[in-house]
């Protein structure tokens, strides 16, 4: 009995019953929760919550005269806060208010909701920040791309007109000024191009564009360009190419060029005298890929050990006096990584630097090797004598026409290996084009004979281009194994033919 | 002398800063700590109008809900003006705002609604304005409870509108 009474008392202590009149005066109150809310006091002064009574009077109807408000924070001034449910019932002249104190239960609930909300808010804020960052990055990249595009046209014009200006009758000082303008315009173009590449690399938008090209031709064009660039310096430039390389590859030609030239530009920047060497070796050859080692070595100021990792960071230059943005090595490293390769530097201060790139490039798919031949430079130093060994008259005529049109070749034509040997023994040829399928012995056997049976270097080392309509998948390797320097599958275009010939003649000159 | 009182109910998703706006206006205080509101807390602020009369603004700071329909409907009863608050730094709090406002206007056709983007101090307004435009969010105020920017302006504008 005593327990029941205690429970009842505890229960009643959690509830307060209040009756107010139409003016808000408290008529009855048990004052269990809020002692000051007692008879004679005005409910509107008790707590601003009760102002709701005025608003509800406007909406109360005989059918809707009870209203419940859950989880309302109530407190007497400067006293403890209660979290309560409040029921309000409107009668004709009185309003009954019942306040239930559920503070403990509500506070428990609040802990759970606080944790849940905290976690959701943090994740949403993070998501929003990321989204803004992505948008900002996109804006920056578009901006750089647009600026680069807008600047490329005037820069090309500047360079073009300076080229024309240089060909006019300029005095020494004017020539020097024109040279500076040209060099600065090129420099500006490189800066913008590097910036564009970096923004694309960093945003993940950068894509490699593979094409079939001839690695030898690429290296040769680099060699020619840098020999011109360095011709007035007291720095030598030497290029070494591993002949074991199958030069026809399927890769991003522009970016391979960019990697090598960025490193060469860096070498030039820090080398005042001595030599800059570019070497390319085949490290590993698989069916579909060849792994290359590209070495750029200079005799420049060298890089202290502690700075060797820093030099691949953007906007880092070890010597502030040198011009440039410091983006070249950063771009080169990113491009090498995009191609799945590695780049390292070995250097000591004052001892020059050696940059070493390991990169695997895909071989051109079989039958597409000829697609690489797009550019060639005809020799203009002298006329070259070419021997055509071909048993088909139409092909003889075609090759003769393609070569003689350019006035830099003498051409002899024979139909079989026996006549070919006779001609080779009697006359020095700069190059021979030999059909693999001849009537007497094969072009492959003829090539082996030329390579093995003669001590005269003019004969045994003569460049040989094999030609054939044979669609055998490994015909290129067969031709190269026999000792041919290059191979062209029929049908071929004039460009392909001239490209092969001019490249071999140019290598021979060295 | 207080002549009349008007109920203003702050609604919107959780964590948008309704309580901070409420405290900035009533007590001119601000806290960086987020404390979620359970249920509703109510305070009164008496303001003096230009004509010398006084108006009691009874501010109901409600707990946050993503959808208005998910909230406790009794809190909305007798409201003279709603303030729908969203967080400028959390797109989730305003990407569906138009649906919420539509719901509110259908339920309470005669009650004005002010739309306010809070946490102006935490965002780059140029970036956010683009997003707001993309989502066709129409707002009345972009404010900051932290700095107090536009908070008084909001409540004073509501007061003037309600009196007129």
Image (cartoon, coloured by chain):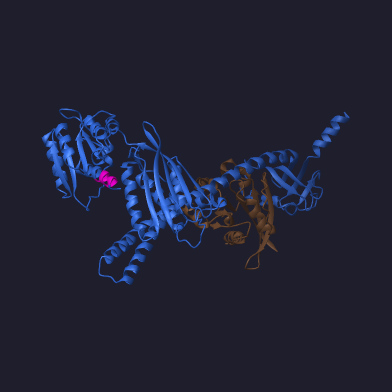
Q: Position of residue B144 (x, y in %)?
A: 60, 57
User: Could you tell whether A345 is left or right of B146 in the image?
Assistant: left
Q: Give the colour in which the image draws chain B.
A: brown
Q: Which chain is blue?
A: A
Q: Quadrant of the N terminus of chain A?
A: top right
Q: Is residue A204 magenta?
A: no
Q: Position of residue A311 (x, y in %)?
A: 51, 52
Magenta stretch, main secondary structure, is helix
Q: Residue reaching furthest front?
A: A455
| Residue A284 figure quarter | top left
Count of numbered tags: 0
Which range is magenta? A502-508
Q: Position of residue B59 (x, y in %)?
A: 65, 53
Q: Position of residue B157 (x, y in %)?
A: 58, 61
Q: Residue at x 31, y 45 (%)?
A: A217
Which residue is more in the foreground, B136 or A391? A391
Compared to residue B13, the image places residue B125 above or below, namely: below
Which residue is more in the foreground, A288 or B88? A288
């Amino acid at each position: 009995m005593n327990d029941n009474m205690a429970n009842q008392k505890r229960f009643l202590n959690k509830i307060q019953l209040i009756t107010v009149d139409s003016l808000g005066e408290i008529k009855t109150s048990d004052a269990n929760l809020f002692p000051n809310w007692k008879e004679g006091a005005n409910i509107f002064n008790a707590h601003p919550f009760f102002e709701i009574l005025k608003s509800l009077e406007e909406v109360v109807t005989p059918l809707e005269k009870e209203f419940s408000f859950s989880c309302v924070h109530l407190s007497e001034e400067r006293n403890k806060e209660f979290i309560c449910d409040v029921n309000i019932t409107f009668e004709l002249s009185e309003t009954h208010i019942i306040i239930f104190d559920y503070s403990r239960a509500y506070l428990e609930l609040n802990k759970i909701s606080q944790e849940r909300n905290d976690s959701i808010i943090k994740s949403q804020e993070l998501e929003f920040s990321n989204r803004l960052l992505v948008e900002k990055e996109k804006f920056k990249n578009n901006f750089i791309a647009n600026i680069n595009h807008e600047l490329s046209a005037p820069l090309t014009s500047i360079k073009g007109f300076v080229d024309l200006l240089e060909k006019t009758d300029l005095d020494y000082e004017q020539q020097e000024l024109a040279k500076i303008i040209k060099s600065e315009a090129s420099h500006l173009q490189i800066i913008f191009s590097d910036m564009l590449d970096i923004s694309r690399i960093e945003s993940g938008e950068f894509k490699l564009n593979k094409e079939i090209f001839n690695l030898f031709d690429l290296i040769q064009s680099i060699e020619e360009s840098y020999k011109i660039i360095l011709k007035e310096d007291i720095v030598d430039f030497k290029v070494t190419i591993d002949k074991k390389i199958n030069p026809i590859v399927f890769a991003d030609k522009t970016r391979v060029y960019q990697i090598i030239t960025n490193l060469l530009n860096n070498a030039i920047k820090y080398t005042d005298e001595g030599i800059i060497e570019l070497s390319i070796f085949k490290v590993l050859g698989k069916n579909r890929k060849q792994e290359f080692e590209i070495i750029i070595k200079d005799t420049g100021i060298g890089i202290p050990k502690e700075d060797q990792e820093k030099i691949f960071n953007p906007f880092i230059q070890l010597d502030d006096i040198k011009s440039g943005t410091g983006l070249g090595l950063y771009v080169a490293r990113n491009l090498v990584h995009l191609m799945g390769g590695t780049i390292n530097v070995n250097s000591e201060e004052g001892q020059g630097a050696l940059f070493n790139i390991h990169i695997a490039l895909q071989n051109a798919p079989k039958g597409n090797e000829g697609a690489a031949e797009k550019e060639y430079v005809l020799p203009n130093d002298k006329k070259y004598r070419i021997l055509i060994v071909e048993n088909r008259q139409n092909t003889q005529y075609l090759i003769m026409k393609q070569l003689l049109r350019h006035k830099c070749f003498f051409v002899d034509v024979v139909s079989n290996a026996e006549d070919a040997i006779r001609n080779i023994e009697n006359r020095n040829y700069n190059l021979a084009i030999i059909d693999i399928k001849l009537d007497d012995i094969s072009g492959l056997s003829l090539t082996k004979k030329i390579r093995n049976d003669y001590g005269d270097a003019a004969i045994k080392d003569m460049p040989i281009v094999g030609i054939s309509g044979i669609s055998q998948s490994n015909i290129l390797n067969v031709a190269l194994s026999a000792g041919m320097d290059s191979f062209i599958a029929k049908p071929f275009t004039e460009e392909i033919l001239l490209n092969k010939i001019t490249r071999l003649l140019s290598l021979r000159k060295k | 002398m207080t002549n009349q009182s008007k109920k203003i109910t702050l609604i919107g998703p959780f964590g948008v800063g309704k309580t901070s706006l409420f405290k900035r206006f009533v007590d001119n205080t601000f806290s960086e700590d987020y404390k979620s509101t359970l249920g509703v807390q109510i305070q009164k602020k008496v303001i003096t109008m230009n004509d010398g009369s006084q108006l009691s603004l009874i501010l109901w700071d409600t707990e946050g809900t993503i959808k208005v329909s998910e909230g406790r409907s009794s809190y909305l009863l007798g409201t003279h003006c709603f303030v729908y608050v969203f967080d400028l730094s959390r797109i989730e709090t305003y990407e569906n705002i138009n649906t919420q406002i539509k719901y509110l206007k259908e339920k309470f056709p005669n009650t004005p609604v002010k739309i306010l983007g809070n946490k102006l101090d935490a965002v780059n307004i140029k970036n956010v304005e683009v997003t707001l435009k993309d989502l066709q969010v129409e707002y009345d105020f972009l404010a900051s409870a932290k700095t107090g920017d536009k908070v008084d302006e909001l409540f004073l504008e509501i007061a003037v509108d309600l009196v007129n």
